[in-house]
Image (cartoon, helix red, strand yellow):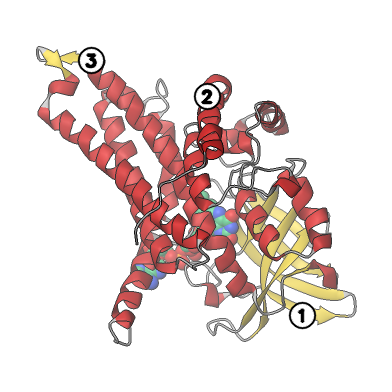
Amino acid sequence: MPVNLDHSPEVVDLARRTAEFVREVVIPAEGEHSGVSAAGGEELRTRLQDAARGAGVFAPHVSPEFGGHGLDMRGRALVFEEAGYSLFGPLALNIAAPDEGNMHMLEAIATPAQKERYLRPLAGGQVRSCFAMTEPAPGAGSDPAALTTRAERVSAGWRIDGRKWFITGADGAAYAICMARTSGEPGTRGGATMFLVDADNPGMKIVRHIDTLDEAFFGGHCEVLFDGCVVPEEAVLGEVDKGFEYAQVRLGPARMTHCMRWLGIARRAQDIAVARAADRRLFGSRLAELGMVQQMIADNEIDLAATRALLREACQELDEGGHGRKSTSIAKTFAAEALHRVVDRAAQMCGGLGVSTELPIARIAREIRPFRIYDGPSEVHRWSIARRAVRELGGNA
Ligand SMILES: Cc1cc2nc3c(=O)[nH]c(=O)nc-3n(C[C@H](O)[C@H](O)[C@H](O)COP(=O)(O)OP(=O)(O)OC[C@H]3O[C@@H](n4cnc5c(N)ncnc54)[C@H](O)[C@@H]3O)c2cc1C
């Protein structure tokens, strides 16, 4: 597919202003805090978001009706990479996961009343949200069909029972979008439904924070219990039993926006390493003149450029109304692995400093590693890419 690289002057200008905002306002705030989750709570978020509003770069992805710039996926690729140049950039622009993916899905499938109640305050940065799909074994993880959380019809609407974990941003979220089984049995695909559950519902409880390698996601990664959680009929997001289909509406684009943000931070790691390699003198020459370091610098450039190209191709397909199942799987798998390599090489080029807290690279390495697991582990994407390839040639995989 020929990739259309044209961007309107407005999008190019927004990307330029985002880069400037991140450099001048967001990066200086990084030094104040070791990680977003330990970063003085809502104070940092609201301060940076106010600044982003002032700079005219806030919420670039949502439609103007909800206070945004209405960027398509290709436009997002340009702007989100610039925002991702700092771990705090996506938070400042209100394009961090999981809120950004939730906004995308709410715009696509929520009713007008649900948009007013849930999307508008989320898009405006007044509240945060979470997306509750994954469950402890034997429940849903890599295989969504294993979904065990159930929702049954009751006189007041629906009653949800089940346990979720690794739910990013759950602590402090105003609501969860919870995926529950409404037909079929675990192991058969059957039907799932998405429910909007307010955080003050007595049937929804944050059980604990799960300690993970990363610490830059606001609200942590939590275990969440739905125990006799009754919600009204208006809490159903989209149609009953269509939850797996709607998950695709969220997951394809959300995978790509993760790639965009991580592309930005991996480029930052490379910039730091290249600057240091150009400066550091060893064995009578600059580090950047030694062949094995040149190879690391070049391999990083190749991985960054290839990630950007795959991302653009997948975004174009999504913008043109395609599902992008194959192209988003390819881009996600490549990006998660390539950007991990970029950051690892950047650390190597910086020697001891690369794994210290004197430079941001070690922190970036910690943050980026889990991306090879969430939004589909690499093995699941490879499995699906291979099955599709065989099917396309008339096989049965
Ligand atoms: C930091 C972080 C944030 C997360 N945030 C959220 C969130 O906000 N909401 C949410 O619902 N979930 C979230 N998750 C959960 C995430 O989506 C799951 O961890 C992921 O889908 C994998 O599921 P699992 O952990 O149950 O691993 P399992 O399903 O047990 O898989 C374990 C491993 O098996 C291998 N594997 C799986 N399938 C295949 C296959 N077909 N072929 C070969 N090997 C295979 C892979 O290596 C995989 O890593 C998050 C996870 C992390 C780490």
Q: In the structure shown, which secondary structural element does the residue marked by tag 3 occupy?
A: loop
Above or below for 396 versus 285: below
Query: Residue 152, labelled with which disc?
Result: 1
Q: Which of marks 1 and 2 is nearer the N terminus?
A: 2
| Amino acid under disc 1 | Glu
* Contact, mark 1 vs mark 2 (Cβ under 8 Å): no
Q: In this view, does 46 lie to the left or right of 13?
A: right
Separation (CA) of disc 2 from disc 3: 28 Å
Nearest-to-viewer mark from 1 and 2 = 2
* Other-residue count near label 1 (Cα within 10 Å), few / some / many at <14 / 14–19 / ≥20: some
Instruction: Tell me the kind of residue under disc 2.
Output: Glu
Q: In this view, does 156 lie above or below 287?
A: below
**Near-viewer residue (55 or 291):** 55
Label 2 neighbour load within 10 Å: few <14, some 14-19, many 20+: some
The secondary element bearing badge 2 is classed as helix
Where residue 317 is drawn, which disc sits there?
A: none
In the drawing, does residue 316 fall left or right of residue 111? left
Q: Distance between the residues labelled 3 and 1?
A: 64 Å
- Quadrant of the rendering where the C terminus is positioned: bottom left
**Which residue is label 3 attached to?**
280
Camera-side residue: 265 or 309? 309
Q: Separation of disc 1 and disc 2 at Cα?
A: 50 Å
Q: Residue at x 71, y 28 (%)?
A: 50
Task: Say which quarter of the image contains residue 172.
Answer: top right
* Among the two numbered marks 3 and 1 on one chain, the one whose residue lies closer to the N terminus: 1
Q: Is residue 46 above or below residue 193?
A: above
> Quarter of the image containing the N terminus?
bottom left
Q: Count the marks.
A: 3
Task: Give coordinates of residue 110: x percent, y percent.
Answer: 74, 64
The tag earlier along the polypeptide, 2 or 3, is: 2
CB contact under 8 Å: marks 2 and 3:
no
Q: Nearer the viewer, residue 378 or 61?
A: 61
